[in-house]
Amino acid sequence: MNSPNLAEFPGKTNPPAKKKKQKRYPFGSAYFFSVPNKFYDGGYAARLTPAGIARYSTLLRISNYCYGKRMLMMPATEMQLQDGLTPRTARRVYAKMKLLGLIEIRIKDGLPAEILLIHPDDWPNLSGKRPHLERDSSGNPHCVLR
């Protein structure tokens, strides 16, 4: 059965077109679960302190909340409320993440004004041994440096 043309009926209008649902991935084409995999398998987590992992997780969370924006502009006081890092610790963490190639920072008045999350495909390959999970002969997982 054909649906009636609503233009023939006075006072009736066609329903509005549905909006395309906006994705919340900060890295567009990369699925969100691949970010922690690359973060751990690439050896980045082993080179960061727990504070660094907390701050990077907070940055991903804020990016997800902002519908996938990779350029984040949030005052340091609000960031501190999110993950509890003091400004001195946050400064050290940002320096380490920038050194590892995870973020880029734009400084304004001596404070980070904008933080750009780098796409995982653009992260540099780290040299040295990295932790990998393997199973032993009994099937139990254990960490091996390769």
Image (cartoon, rainbow, N blue to C red):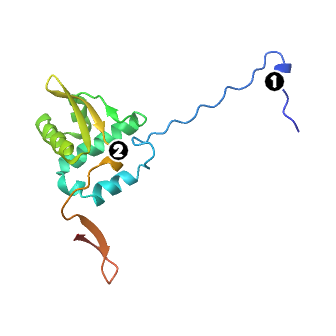
Does residue 14 lie above or below 42 as drawn? Answer: above
Does residue 37 lie above or below 26 as drawn? Answer: below
Residue sticking out furthest to the left? 88
Q: Position of residue 55 (x, y in %)?
A: 24, 43
Residue sticking out furthest to the bottom? 137
Q: Nearer the viewer, residue 143 or 11?
A: 143
Q: Quadrant of the C terminus?
A: bottom left
Q: Position of residue 137 (x, y in %)?
A: 32, 84
Secondary structure under badge 2? loop
**Residue wearing tag 1:** 6
Query: For mark 2, does the 10 Å Cα neighbourhood hold few (<14), some (14 to 19), or many (20 or more) residues?
Result: some
Q: In terms of image quadrants, where is residue 26?
A: top left
Q: Position of residue 39 (x, y in %)?
A: 29, 54
Q: Quadrant of the N terminus?
A: top right
Q: Residue at x 33, y 55 (%)?
A: 38
**Residue wearing tag 2:** 119
Q: In terms of image quadrants, where is residue 88?
A: top left
Q: Nearer the viewer, residue 119 or 10?
A: 119
Secondary structure under badge 1? helix
What is the three-letter code of the residue carrying label 1?
A: Leu
Instruction: Give left or right: position of 75 versus 17.
Output: left
Q: Position of residue 60 (x, y in %)?
A: 33, 42
Q: Residue at x 34, y 41 (%)?
A: 61
